[in-house]
Image: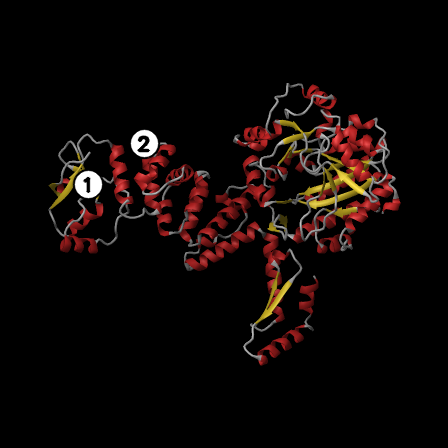
Amino acid sequence: MFDTLKEIHISDIDIKDERYRISSESENIAFLARSIKEMGLMNPPVVRPMNDGKFILISGFNRIKALQYNNESKVRVRPTDTEIEDYHCLLFAVAALAFRRPLTQVELIISVKRLSRYLDRENMAKMSPAVFNTQLAQGFIDDLVNIGSLPDPALELIHTGQLSLKSAKRISHLDMDAISFFLDIFSKIRASASVQLELIQNILETAAREGVHPKSLFQELNIPDPLDDETADMTVRTHCFRTLVFEQRYPVLSRTRQRIQDKIASIKLPGTIKLIPSENFESRKYSISFTVKNHDEFEKNIQHLTDALENKTLREILDS
Amino acid sequence: MDNSLPLDDEADYLVSKIRLEPQRIQDSGEVYDFINHSDDPVSLAKKTLYITQNKGALIRNCPGTCHYTCCDYTILHTGTFCTMDCSYCILQAYFHPPVLQYFAGFEPVRQALQAVFLENKIFRIGTGEYTDSLIWEKVSLMPEFLVKTFARQKNSVLELKTKTVNIESLLSLDHNEKTIIAWSLNTPEIIRSQERGTASLTARLEAARQAESKGYRLAFHFDPIVIYPGCEEQYKNVIQKIFEYVRPETIVWISLGTFRFMPGLKSVMEKRFPASTLCYGEFILGLDNKMRYFKPLRIHIYKEMIAALKTYAPDVFLYFCMEDEEVWEKCLDFFPKKQGELGRLLDRSAAGHCSLNKAFL
């Protein structure tokens, strides 16, 4: 499959042809360039000879870029034989990277998606230890292929952590308008994986309940979209959006929570005392707690609670 | 059909009604595997009847959950699953896999019931917990056998719960007031959209009228009550309609229970009933780890329905299926707090309506 090492001109490599590129481009290759300069090129790039005497890269994209950075004109490469098939080049590109370091999620998605042109999921799962340096289950391969079919900027969002694999999988089963709608949302917020799933579920369920398409949910309910406020900080925007979505999904529960919180606040208990209703008000039980450092503080808190006994709102809360 | 079952009169009747040659099997695992290997085990299970014997307990207590008040019902386990297809049916997620089983054999049932009939207490016994009591009436003599068996004693009532109108074979029986035929009711909108293959509301009430005319005692169960825009008026219309068909005096009890479900049911519903939005209401995780409507919503619909029920039938015994103290107090102004108190109230109503021995109360 491979010929012996050969020195070629870097200019003979068509570096724009990235058909076998799996890794994302390093933003800063200065360290790699310096390493090559001081210690030499330890792993020669692998290239595929083309009929016109030029080469395309199978692995070593960043190394070639680093050599260019060092103004090198030649490089020792490992060429494949000329008859090699596309499929084998791709297998080698994936394996070369996977056995050097664990693939990132995006690299895994790209690899699986491209290999799915040549392999069904059963065979890919069988070959996965040798190619991916890990065992991939058939179901997971299916998921990755589906995620790999998502439009831009899905992979970018996965790369930046704004879209988890689980969320990507969830939206991959939706229609294209809904997919674009969710990708737009996740490009404007930064939420944990569990919050992402909560948002997707709440939006889909509210839309289903209202009989509207998710993308027109906010217009249909006549709600200003908090994501349109580009002046807001991303964390604030995420929090506002999550709250708004929850309020649409659980309107009565949200209003009740707010009303009780307002009532508790109106009692004006000191910050050391917490009055907390039961989760979702299913139980009638409230918990009252305070923390103290000494007996004096204990006495003060007891006094505050004794004073609160006269408060009508407290009675209203506890006896409602 | 279980290979060990004899082809006696009961089995012969069943097979003749189904009009299919049964396939004899050695091991119930064959049925489970057959159903489990389907892409849609629930749908396949509804079309696959397994005639077998009940190898477990025939008489069981209702599996009520903690924190919510149970009616202390007794279950007579004569079959499992259902041929009708309600989107919200918990049996879809309760059995793994669901199997439509008919438990053949009158003798074990007779023996189990005889032991119950000898006790000095009231029993409310139903066959409608793990199946619809009367889907079997078209193919089996079991409902008829049960009505006749219960007619000969004085401490137990049989409650046959159904969404069908399959009462024809029961109408001419001497039931001695010991059988309550109960219909699960819902609004026409919910019946049409969520209760595939069930009888219409009008048909159910017409059947109730027929049963009443033959002296049967009746019960109605609003369970699950589904909350949706305009549901209050629609449930009130159903309530009004009940009393256009039957007299309040013949109704032993009416229960109310809003839709609640094990979390696992949601994915089954989404897969099997993609058009259903039932589980997208305001559900919270209840204290028994089932999803329930947010409590103020439950209280609101209960109050509306109870007010309507009281208008038409002020003396009919109303109760909640699996609700807590707050709901009872706010909606019915009392709470059966003591262990077994709700059961005793239901026993009292059964004894009054069904001529049971009141000394057992």
Quadrant containing the N terminus of chain A in the rendered view: top left
Mark 2: which amino acid? Tyr
Q: Residues within 10 Å of mark 2 (few under 14, many from 20)?
A: some
Numbered marks: total:
2
Please give the residue where the numbered disc 1 appears in the rendered image.
A46
**Horizontal and vertical percent for residue A65?**
19, 48
Q: Is residue A247 above or below residue A291?
A: above
Question: Residue at (60%, 30%) from the top-left corner?
Answer: B28
At mark 1, the secondary structure is strand
Left or right, A80 with respect to B68, comes to left
Q: Quadrant of residue A57?
A: top left
At mark 2, the secondary structure is loop
Residue sitting nearer the eye, B154 or A213: B154
Chain letter for the residue marked with disc 1 in the picture: A
Q: CA distance from mark 1 to mark 2?
A: 21 Å
Please give the residue where the numbered disc 2 appears in the rendered image.
A118
Quadrant containing the C terminus of chain A in the rendered view: bottom right
Question: Residue at (68%, 72%) from the top-left corner?
Answer: A309
